[in-house]
Amino acid sequence: MNELFQVINAFVDKILFFDIFFEQIEGVSFPFVVAWLILGGVYLTIKMGFVNLHMFAHSFAIVRGKFRTKEDKGLITPFQSLATALSATVGIGNIAAVSIAISLGGAGAAFWMIIAGFLGMTLKFTEVTLSVKHREFLPDGTIMGGGMEYLSRGLAQKGMHNLGKILAIIFAFFMIFGALGAGNLFQISQSVAIMQEHIPFLKESSLTFGLVKDNGYLFGLFMAIITGLVIIGGIKRIAQVAAKIVPLMVIFYLLMVFWVLGTYFTAIPDAFALIFTEAFSPTAVAGGMLGAMIQGFQRAVFSNEAGLGSAGIAHSTAKVKYPVRQGLVSLYEPFIDTVVVCTMTALVVILTGSYLGGTEALEAAIVAKQGAVITSTAFGSVVSWFSTVLGFAIFMFAFSTMVTWSYYGERAWVYLFGTKSSIIYKLIFLAFIVIATITETETMVEFSSILFLALAVPNIIGLLILSGDVKEMLQEYLTKLKSGEFDKEAIRD
């Protein structure tokens, strides 16, 4: 299995991740997909008039339910859609990916993660708006949305039927593999490493399927069972679980962070100064400014998924009348995930210095890209039992991410193979949870990262072509908002 992942890694890397024609210090090159995401984010942010800034307050009012109407259509509330999408993004990526980015790209990577989060807000707004506009209500009562729909249906309306269909099929295949990789294998491979630190029994050797392996697979079996109990119930059950878990786990995690920041309170200004300095320093680790930027953007996208078209699958199920309205709700995803949570994690890792190594265990974790171990060590260096508490947080983060990404992959599977075969996908997804506990972690990180970022290629092509439609819808929405029309049609409790 490990060899298979390596072959897939090499193939996709050659096809999609060829380098742009310049290099910097230590031969660091700029992957095409990273440049593609940056250019897409900058272009859409300017074209949408910096909607990620001036519509932030209105977005919060929508989340609170202020603009509900009798004509809203969907399965779950805008808040539940946001919570479901956040359960996919606020996860191991906020704990592990941040530490990996900083250990590989230096403290400056945190600055570029914040910039990626800012640009990602507009990318997310655009793809979610298109997802709701082009969503399809299926006979079985479910909703099909996301990149598959706006690539196929949206481009068809532009007279690009063949191009749209090809991009949608490519997107759907990448979505399935991304769900199995980043939404499953990466989550488990990172969390099992932490669980083994706190439950020694999971480290003990065991005879498993004819192979001598540790008992980590038991953790995989447990996760497969509880995940299966949720995902079989579909999006409504996933949304109900996410709406309860996400707010609690974010607050729980931030309380731990604030404790650490309180301990290092006087050093926080120096940490921010280091982040800014190394973001532009030609002598920073791993290739200077270019290396920090690459790591920052890669890991930020890995965490918040902006530009990948995945979140639109969850948001397309929201009960809304206007597509733009749910697009505005989605602005909070990259903001909460990257600008807030990832920045907090970055400060903890930088203030404690865990990303620099210093011990044999940390050096091994950095080499193996076990970001969760690096972050756990950072928390444990302040309060010894924090690493144990973080283990519980990682468990919850991994669980919430997997249940949502199982749905993303299932929708892509249904798009390609039909509704009746969705149970096959769900069984494969659950099987991969166990597989992740018996496969090398480093390979999992590379496998999931490549397939994750690959989604951006077909997705941003569609976003750029259809951006004019989104701009027009946004302008119409703003006109109605200023006229007071929305206040008249809103339901009053």
Image (cartoon, grey):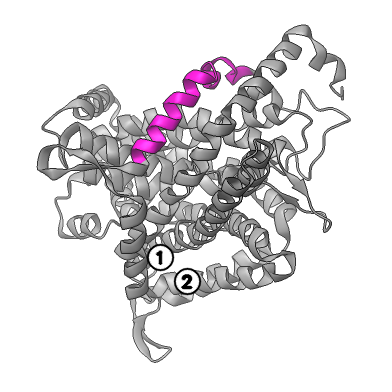
In front: 151, or 313?
151
- In the figure, residue 420 lies in which quadrant? bottom right
The vertical placement of 219 against 70, above or below, is: below
Helix, strand or loop: magenta stretch: helix
Task: Give the amino acid at mark 2.
Answer: Phe
Q: Quadrant of the C terminus?
A: top right
Name the residue: 60% across, 25% down.
468
Residue that carries the numbered disc 1 in the rendered image: 192
Q: Secondary structure at mark 2?
A: helix
Q: Secondary structure at mark 1?
A: helix
Residue 311 appears in the figure:
yes
Residue 63 appears in the figure:
no
Name the residue: 28% across, 26% down.
268
Name the residue: 48% across, 37% down.
337
* 349 in the magenta segment: no
Q: Are marks 2 and 1 in contact (CB under 8 Å)?
A: yes
Instruction: Say whether disc 2 or disc 1 marks the residue closer to the N-terminus.
Output: 1
The total number of labels drawn is: 2
Boundaries of the magenta span: 34-57
Name the residue: 89% across, 30% down.
70
* Image x and y of residue 330, in percent: 60, 33
- In the figure, residue 111 lies in which quadrant? top left
* Image x and y of residue 239, in percent: 69, 49
Residue lying at the far bottom in this picture: please name it. Answer: 210
Task: Give the amino acid at mark 1.
Answer: Val
* 40 in the magenta segment: yes
Q: In this image, 108 relative to 415: left or right?
A: left
Q: Which mark, residue 219?
A: 2
Q: In this image, 27 relative to 368: left or right?
A: left
Q: Which mark, residue 86?
A: none
